[in-house]
Amino acid sequence: MTQTQSAIIKLESAQELRITMDQYFARLKDAAETGNKKIAWCTSVGPAELLYSMGFEVYFPENHGAMLGSGKQADKYIPTAVAQGYSPDICSYLTSDIGAFLQNETPLQKSGFKSVPNPDILVYNTNQCREVGDWFSFYGKHFNVPVLGIHTPLSINELTPGIIKNVARQIENIVPELEKVADQKFNIDKFRETIELSRAGCVLWEKVLAKAKTRPSPINFFDAAIHMGPIVVMRGTQYAIDYYKVLLTELEERIANKISAVPDEKFRIYWDGMPLWYQLSNMAKLFARLDSCIVASTYCNSWVFNDLDPADPFTSSAYAYCKLFIVRSDTVKENILEKLMIDFSVDGIIYHDSKTCQRNSNNHYGMQTRLFEKNSIPYLEINGDLNDPRCFSEEQSIVAVETFIHQLSNRS
Amino acid sequence: MYKLGLDLGSSYTKGVVVDNNNQIVDYQLVKTGFDYKKATGKIIDKFSSKYQIDFPVYTCGYGREEIEQPHIANSEIIALSEAVFSIYKRKCSVIDIGGQDTKYIKINDHGQVDKFRMNRKCAAGTGSFIEEIAFRMDISPPEFSKLALKSTREVRLNSYCTVFAVSEIVGMVKKGIVIPDIINGIYNSIISRCTELSPVEDFLVITGGVPDNHPAIVSLFKKTFKDSESPPRSQFLAALGCVLLNNQHK
């Protein structure tokens, strides 16, 4: 258990990723400065394809929230939002993002932005949580621009035709308002094309994640949490497809050359819940030191929308975005997790109980003990938060993870 | 030659000298403060003047790497389990109440950790919780425990938060509830926090600085868990376990 220097082998595609993300932000900056394209703000699992198909540049506040978290800046901004009446117990993406906005600061300023790009319209889908509606409403009021919401039922057990029809209609219903703001007519062929680009990107992303089924795995959760950027913000564009082809090729080469993400992979872990953005690097080193690879996660696996179908773009959008893990019933979630444990040959599960993200913490209603009764895979619960480092005890968590891996070593 | 085990905890650093028969021959306890190196230096100096210490020393606890001398670091949970199993040699549950942490550990028939849980990032249910309340009530820890034994009626403390717990206690005093009953309520609230970590299914071993310094809480535990025990000087067990783990690996 004595600490030795960990060795993490970084993906060479990281350079291409940086270029891809820089270009995305450059397009947004250009739109913000010149006004040559309208800007829509969208939730991370909102109808990005529709927005891209109508010529918007699309900005994702959650991506900005993750940037604040990974830059270890969130706790500087959260109190400002709390002072405005936003509880410290609600989504710390929301509180850090609004707090940073109120302080007129953003990590995008390092890329030449004056501020976050002003929206012409905001579009959210409550499939992930109710907070997104409150979050976007704050900005809608501030910028005096329309806020459109798709209200997806929660805890969906069966994806009934009624639910899909309802959500599909809601997506269709926002089109006229989008047309007004975009100042262009909706084009169904363009939408079909964007849906196909999104589907193709998701298929590639799924293939990337599936490479971790190989033992040893060429990619871990910490890589995936960073390299998922394009599938979140450029879903429905060729840019995401081009990037994931590069990444997939590198992973295939890694497998052929027996290069693994964790040099001496002994234990394969599943991560449930949000990343600890402010601890990503430390956690990556910790797990590498313990010869443990986090091979799959609920978080990264959530951006797989391969049910999108250009033949029926509205209905398939509704289906894909209602099929999402986070919006499903606990029964469905439990079955999904159980299958993932088998598919990725998992030795242990870590549940991150995120203080401000109840919806993405799956250890609140006994699922961890039910799953253990089914598959006998040991689990560990870590208390923390996606963005607010004040909710996380690094020392306690390190002891817990070290002990957990020791526990797994007794079983092998 | 003697081996040295050190548990560098958040509140106290505990050191034990262990002979070739794995028996503790000497103990040291110092306040950790903010300087682990200073705390361990004090212990090592004292022991080195009396015993020939075989380096490296074996460490666990939050400061397990914060030591200048050659050392091998361990998880305090594994170390504690090793020591507990060396005493009882049977399947058991352990509840350890330290300065900042409360832990539940389930040890199997082979002495391995089958399951463990730790408290959330909150002082409720830990030694710091009692220390703060005792300080605010101006009662010394030994007196605190003695007073609890005089309790005649059960009162319930509802606050998790230390600060709010103090306010609640002030309210209880105003209502005329006597101090022994209040202290008993504080101990029961700690037990409640501990038992939230996991169901206790087996023989229970209670360890840590809190049971060592507050015998009244051990008595209360025993009321709920008939098959339970708190070994003497239990807060030194993790330090002993560090040495035992190393012997096992050799």
Image: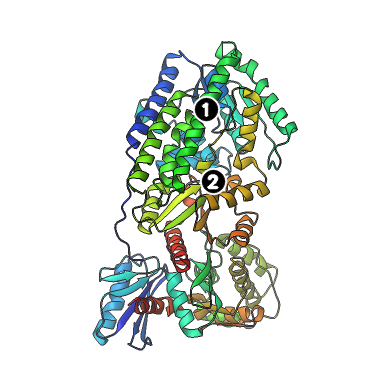
Mark 1 and mark 2 residues within 8 Å of each other at the beta carbon: no
Which quadrant does the N terminus of chain A fall into? bottom left
How far, Cα to Cα, is label 1 from label 2?
20 Å
Q: Residue at x 37, y 86 (%)?
A: B22
The coloring applied to the image is rainbow
Graded by Cα atoms within 10 Å as few (under 14), some (14 to 19) or many (20 or more), the crowding at tag 2 reads many
The residue that mark 2 highlights is A298
* Nearer mark to the viewer, of 1 and 2: 1
> Toward the viewer: A251 or B126?
A251
- Whether residue A403 sits left or right of residue A91 in the image: it is left
| Residue B144 vertical position relative to residue A288 in the rendered view, above or below | below
Among all residues in the image, which is located at the extreme front? A256
- Residue A321, x across and y down, in percent: 61, 33
Residue type at mark 1 is Ser
Residue A73 in view here = no
Which quadrant does the C terminus of chain A fall into? bottom left
Q: Earlier in the sequence, mark 1 or mark 2?
A: 1
Q: Residue A198 carries which label?
A: 1
> Toward the viewer: B125 or A406?
A406
Q: Mark 1 lies on which chain?
A: A
Q: Which residue is drawn at 58% across and 69% down?
A: B194
Residue type at mark 2 is Thr
Counting labels gives: 2
